[in-house]
Image: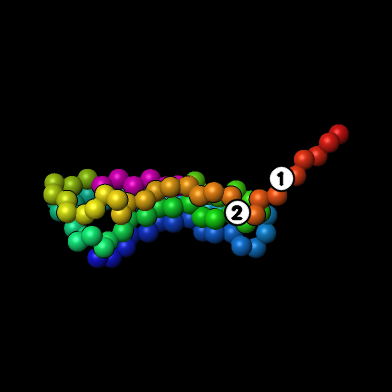
Amino acid sequence: GGSILANGPNDSSGNHGGGSGGSIWITAGTVTGAGTGTIKSIGGDGYNGYGGGGGRVAVRYNTMSFLVANIDARGVVVHNKVVREQYA
């Protein structure tokens, strides 16, 4: 099986957050993947910033032999986050 991806970009250059995952909309009579296909819309990693939010995945079908566990649309956690507070 193949992959359909709309993942957000990672930030590895500085204090920025990762990009949000995109949207995937599939309309098909039959969806197959034989256990190896993936559909993902995952938020990107933030480096010293916040991770991106997950995207959305919609699959409209009549017959599906694709593993639902292989569909992923989650946000990510923060990596190397340094919390800075400013006092007046």
The location of residue 40, given as percent across then percent down, is: 37, 55
Q: Is residue 11 above or below residue 76?
A: below
Rendering colour mode = rainbow
> CA–CA distance between discs 1 and 2?
12 Å
Where is residue 57 shown, x and y percent of the image? 34, 47
Magenta-colored span: 54-59
- The residue tagged with tag 1: helix, strand or loop? loop
Front residue (pair 13, 24):
13
Main secondary structure type of the part rendered in magenta: strand
Q: Residue at x 13, y 46 (%)?
A: 62
Q: Would you name the residue on which mark 1 appears?
A: 83
Amino acid residing under circle 1: Val
Q: Which residue lies at the image location 50% right of the left edge and 49% below the top edge? A: 76
- The reply to whether callout 1 and callout 2 are in contact (CB within 8 Å) is no
Q: Which residue type carries mark 2?
A: His
State yes or no: residue 64 in magenta.
Answer: no
Residue furthest toward the right?
A: 88
- For image coordinates 48% across by 47% down, the residue present is 75
Drawn side of residue 17 relative to residue 7, left or right: right
Q: Is residue 78 visible?
A: yes
Q: Which x, y percent locates residue 67?
A: 24, 53
Residue at the bottom extreme, as displayed: 1
Q: Which residue is mark 2?
A: 79
Whether 56 is among the magenta residues is yes
